Amino acid sequence: MFDDLQKRLSTAFKRFRVSGVLTEANMKEGLREVRTALLEADVNYNVVQDFMARVQEKAVGTQVVKSVRPEQQIVKLVHDEMIETMGPSDPTIRFEKSGPTVIMLCGLQGSGKTTTSGKLAKLLVAQERRPMLVAADLQRPAAVEQLKVVGEQVGVPVFSETGTNPVKLCQDALIEANRRGCDTLILDTAGRLHVDDELMAELVQIEKKVRPHQVFFVCDAMTGQDAVASAEAFNKALELDGVILTKLDGDARGGAALSVRKVTGVPIKFVGKGEKLDKLEPFDPERLVGQMLG
Ligand code: GDP
């Protein structure tokens, strides 16, 4: 994970071997390489521009302390700026005091919504809550079956209906949750390979009529700029409360992780680190940056 970014940054940091004070002139080459490393890791262009401007501003004039090498000072600045860009950590889910809390998961097809629904349910069961999974993806019958399997693995009920529409299905699920004494609903909504108007209209309808208490965007960390562009589109159409980054166990390049918070303005809540249902962790920016810098 983040192998290329790590290698490129460590090469870039070696360019900061200067004595005396860090100046715009003696940092130019090194900063250019840091910038290239971020762009090649698929970090959003505007995010990179902001990032570099802030690192440069903080670095210029920094007195090189004898005991700390200049490149270590730059590493520290880049480290802190990465945390600032991705953080702060906020892995909380606000639960309603009365009645079921409705959490809606949205995202592109294949981003990991169904898997993450199961992971969240497992996490909530461990917190002694009583979740119910809702198969609101009526586009793909296979998705309903997949959610049923996931529900069985976690030991939580799965609500599904045929011959209906997603809004009605979610409303019926709410009634069923009340009847069964479930305190949290996790809506596994439909996705598409690309953002399209029909998908967005469906999700907006669910948001308007079902009024989920929290909407999380499930973001595939391996797809870089695509993930960020779709995050932006989902954030425009829906009021997102958070992002769940998936597939951080794979060969994610870092672009999605470093861009998605700045682009959407909402916190990264959790990260998925595997296909198994116990592979969901609270987002920890320190740890992720540690892995990016090696
Ligand atoms: P959906 O179409 O958004 O519901 O996506 P799925 O939940 O079906 O996930 C798509 C694929 O990604 C499946 O093969 C999952 O096992 C896999 N997947 C989901 N989350 C993770 C993760 O955190 N790490 C890895 N390696 N694979 C994941």
Image (cartoon, rainbow, N blue to C red):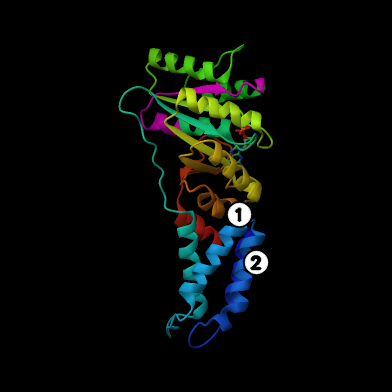
Q: Amino acid at mark 1?
A: Gly
Side of 209 where 229 appears, left or right: right
The quarter of the image that holds ligand 1 is top right
Corner quadrant of residue 113: top right
- Is residue 6 something that shows in the picture? yes
Task: Estimate the x, y position of residue 213 in percent, counting from the top left.
Answer: 42, 31
Q: Is residue 89 above or below residue 82?
A: above
Among numbered discs 1 and 2, the one appearing first in the sequence: 2
Residue 137 painted magenta: yes
Rate crowding at label 1 as few (under 14), some (14 to 19) or many (20 or more) other CA atoms within 10 Å. many
Q: Residue at x 48, y 80 (%)?
A: 69
- Most foreground residue, 240 or 284: 240
Q: Is residue 266 above or below residue 172?
A: below
Q: Is residue 193 above or below residue 290?
A: above
Q: Residue at x 67, y 34 (%)?
A: 196
Q: Which mark is residue 255?
A: 1
Check disc 1 and report its element: helix, strand or loop: helix
